[in-house]
Image (cartoon, rainbow, N blue to C red):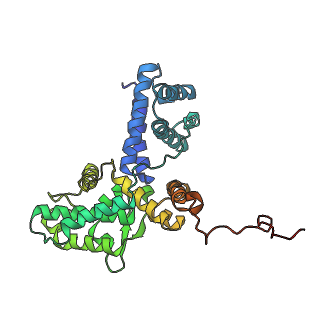
Amino acid sequence: MNRFHRFDVLCAWYKEYATVKGFRPRTVHEYLLEVAFFRRWLEKQTEVQDIDEITPAMVRDFATVLYDKKKAPATIRRNLTSLKSFFSSLYAEHKLYIDLSTAVSLPRIGKKLPTDILTEEEAGKIIDHLESLTSNTKVRTLADAIRLRDHAIFEVLYSTGIRRGELMALRLGDVNYSDGLITIKQGKGGKDRVVPIGEKSLEIVRRYVTSARGMFAQGKSPDALFLTSKGASMGRMTVRETVMRIVREAGITRHVKTHGIRHTCATHMLNHGADIRYVQELLGHSCLSSTQVYTHVSIKQLKESHRKFHPREREEFSDDEAPEESDEQKPAAKGKTE
């Protein structure tokens, strides 16, 4: 009999349980990969025969191994979060007699400032490049259609700040052209939301749908908004490579991926005075602290602008702008004594 038969049965149960609870399929898959890694460690490093013999000390020993491997705190947190979810679910549903999740301590990690944010000049450079390829060109060839599709992808990402997975999941009916809105269905956390899209960006999407998408669509093509040249829904790597190619071909040498466009959208809006709670709603953040990371970037730019442009910092007060002297600073008039 399989030494870890009950462990394997409970992994299959957890897969169904997490799916019913609304976990995204990719999340469930990644969690189970981490649990499988823990299972292999148990087989090699312990004498336990199955899941009921696991002790909190073993769970802590496994966490120590992760730290000893010098893994990044974010990676360790992801490893242990998967294990914590697995054990807490088993205990909550009375599949285990002890709550092993209490033995899992997650490392604290600070929020890193995004490093792949485009400047407004760089974003403008990309848009100018895309417009030079599509504005005066009728879609006659497959290459023309691909260029217009790529333009529409960048416009949607930059205008709305949606995630890569949300872009991939967009369907033709999710775009409301009359109201300038896009419906995001089953975003992160399984939540739906509606986001606005700018008029210029919407017009590019309209042009793509009416004059380019039909060159990709085939008899059995899905109703996905963005298709590959072979008529299939775009995958994660295809979207990523498309964005990186757009940025590179526009002459931007920095490494900017799909999520960098999301960072860019949020930062540029905050730089121009958008309310942080509006940006939170736009991005689909359930917690304001997730959005506040962008304010740090904006504040850095604000401080730099203050240093560069405030007359006090530049020591460029003109005579008219010079601060008035107080009575104590004014020289005494000649011939007068106090």
Q: Residue at x 49, y 36 (%)?
A: 73
Q: Quadrant of the C terminus?
A: bottom right
**Residue 97 pos. (x, y %):** 56, 35
Question: Does residue 142 lie above or below 173 as drawn?
Answer: above
**Residue 66 pos. (x, y %):** 47, 29
In this view, the residue farthest toward the right is 338
Q: Is residue 14 visible?
A: yes
In this view, the residue farthest toward the front is 335
Foreground pick, 334 / 299: 334
Q: Residue at x 39, y 26 (%)?
A: 40
**Residue 239 pos. (x, y %):** 27, 54
Q: Residue at x 34, y 53 (%)?
A: 258
Q: Is residue 9 visible?
A: no
Foreground pick, 89 / 27: 27
In this view, the residue farthest toward the bottom is 178
Q: Quadrant of the N terminus?
A: top left
Question: Does residue 201 lie above or below 284 as drawn?
Answer: below
Q: Quadrant of residue 225?
A: bottom left
Question: Does residue 205 lie above or below 234 as drawn?
Answer: below
Q: Quadrant of residue 143?
A: bottom left
